[in-house]
Amino acid sequence: MSFMKYLRFSNLLKSAFVTMVCAVAVLLAQGCSDDPAAEHYYTFTGETMSDYINSRPQYSHFAYIVKQAGLNDLLSSYGHYTCFLPDNEAVKTYLKEKGIGSIEKLSKNECDTLARTHLVGNIYTTNSMNDGTLNTANMNNRYIQITHGLDSASNSVVFLNRSAYIIYAEQDDSVVNGIVQPVNKVLEMTNSSLGDILRTNQRVSMFYQALQATGLIDTLYKVRDDSYDGALYGYQEYSSHNHPEVAVAPDEKRYGFTAFIEPNDVYLRTLTENGIDVDTTSAKSVLSALYKLALKLYEPTYGNDEDFKQANKDNNKENYSHRWNALNMFVAYHILNRDCIGWNLLTPRELSGFPSPYNTTAIMIKKNLMNPCDWYETLLPRTMMKIEQATVYGDLDGDTQYDRYINRRVKLDDNIRVHGAYISPTIESNYVQDGPNGRYFYINKVIAFDYDTQNIVFNDNIRMDMSTIFPELMTMNIRLNGDPTKDDGSRDYTFANGKNYYFPQGFLDNVNIQGGFFVYRRPHWNFDCYEGDEMNLIGDGYDITFRLPPVPFEGDYQIRLGAAFIETRGIAQIYFDGKPQGIPIDMTKNLQDILGTKWTSNWVGMSDDDKAADQKILKNLGYYRGPYGAIHQNNSEFVNSKYTFRKVLCTVHINPKTDHYLRIRSTSSQGTEFMLDYLELVPKSVYDVMAGKMESPL
């Protein structure tokens, strides 16, 4: 369970800290870098990764590369490493392909890049490598893509970046500071931006032409915000009840994007279905055809909007760079404002080990009852995209279980059938799928923020884990980092199980922190948190304002906060667009405090009528039980807990054409915390149920 944290912050340069931790901890306590200073290496007497590489002649070429990169001491020291190790033949093949005469012709910079591409600061056995990407970046801060297939001997093997694979007979060879995974080819990763990567793939040439014509391609060249310097910030120590922890500031701020693209054949089929002619040899014809398709999709919902009408007049319709031109809107909606890292991380992280029948589930989510999904903002202003993993068997309706879809909503009991677009996990091996600032995926249907998306898919309880509201947390792989099954016994400066983060003012876009600290706590499967992680306002006088996610259509909405409400939390005033909303929220009060003798922890055992009556009582008081679809590792259910529930922050009328802000200001007299686990944006069509009926408990 996550509890109140008493904040005790320390300075990065506080030398006393170094003397308080053990030699192993000192190893990684010199900053946010993964590489400790050489004078602090802690070495072993058993066979280390460095020993393994240097003592076997078949790896002498890679040993040379590691030596030139200056990484031998690192690989001899304490740590948790995985080395994807190419043998001499693989290195020779790589050199020949690059036109390099010998290993000695590689520069030190080239050796550094090659060595770090093959090294990951975490231990990965082949059994732990699921399709998608590794959750930990390699030492070049890039993510290795994982797929599975057969080698020439029909052995089931793990493929890396869709080309190299781990050699079956030699896999999972352990050393004292990690694991070695011999591979048959040298791994390569491009430094090209997402915009350049798309240019090389002829299967998406129609989308690329539209990307150029709209000018949106310029956005996809952004890689890093050089105005942010993580070295200026230190460790932040805090305590959560009896859980002393430490957080770090992000070491850099990168830009990231994720694009979902229809290949040319999907466009050609869709254009034909809509009676639109196109000559693919003419860029003008391609753009005109895609514009006509975009206009057909967006006019039903944006046709009365003045900006849209002006941008799409006959004398202006070829001005594709205009923000409200139909083609510009169409392309922008295909791109998320974050790098989602991998196909497996488009939705809540999968995790094994939960009690039956939820043994393998999205973290803290009952996949047999509720499809894991997330909602992300796109480059089309004030719009979001829903990405869902189809897991509920009874609502597959022809879709493939465990695949991921865009803007899908299938509820057969309610006669809702919007299947959305299927997301393909990979692309062809001869094309590059990801770069330093993002990645792209193929989809099998045209997507748009059209009528069905706005009025059917999004006419629902939009539940968003707090970590998805801020795109930087996904681009920087902060969200759901580490090992959720392991707790830290004390403040762990080695970060062996994952990192907690705090965010200096200015790091998060559209966020203003005027007091206290804003902290992200990494996921723990034994905490009372939706998806296992949480965000917290900590310290005396915390005061934060952040932009709310956009809503799909104008109307009245409830804004709800989900959290664990316990006696050591704080009290805060909520503001919507600068206006206070009711009395301050006391997060020390649980549902038993609120309901008294009417409280029961056996919601699951109640009749449907009693459940409806229970929901009505709570709703009238401004509360809802926790989601029935959320589960704790010990098999307890959020809906039965008096601590894990939802508070209605406000009921307000929202115009989707403007930005709206939520402010949370501490009114507690002492340093306490305010937990932010997840938000719900709930339209009146969902919360205003008829007498005797109830909202979905999921």
Image (tube, rainbow, N blue to C red):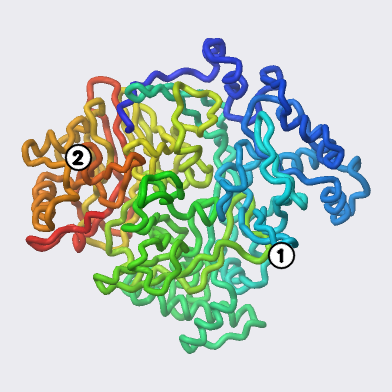
Q: Amino acid at mark 1?
A: Asn
Q: Position of residue 119 (x, y in %)?
A: 69, 39
Q: Quadrant of residue 64?
A: top right
Q: Position of residue 352 (x, y in %)?
A: 45, 47
| Residue 117 at least partly seen | no
Q: Look at the picture and state if 632 lies above or below 500.
A: below
Q: Looking at the rendering, in which quadrant would you find the C terminus? A: bottom left
Q: Position of residue 604 (x, y in %)?
A: 19, 50
- Viewer-side residue, 65 vs 511: 65
1 vs 2, front mark:
1
Q: Is residue 300 left or right of residue 377?
A: left
Mark 2, residue position: 580
The residue that appears at 81% across and 32% down in the rendered structure is: 67
Q: CA distance from mark 1 to mark 2?
A: 56 Å
Mark 1, residue position: 430
| Kind of element beneath mark 2 | strand
Q: Could you tell which of marks 1 and 2 lies nearer the N-terminus?
A: 1
Q: Amino acid at mark 2?
A: Pro
- Viewer-side residue, 464 vs 356: 356
| Residue 629 at least partly seen | yes
Q: Looking at the rendering, in which quadrant would you find the N terminus? A: top left
Give residue 418's mark. none
The residue that appears at 49% across and 52% down in the rendered structure is: 345
Pointer 1 with pointer 2, Cβ within 8 A: no
- Viewer-side residue, 225 vs 412: 412
The residue that appears at 34% across and 55% down in the rendered structure is: 550
| Kind of element beneath mark 1 | loop
Q: Look at the picture and state if 662 lies above or below 607.
A: above
The residue that appears at 49% across and 72% down in the rendered structure is: 327
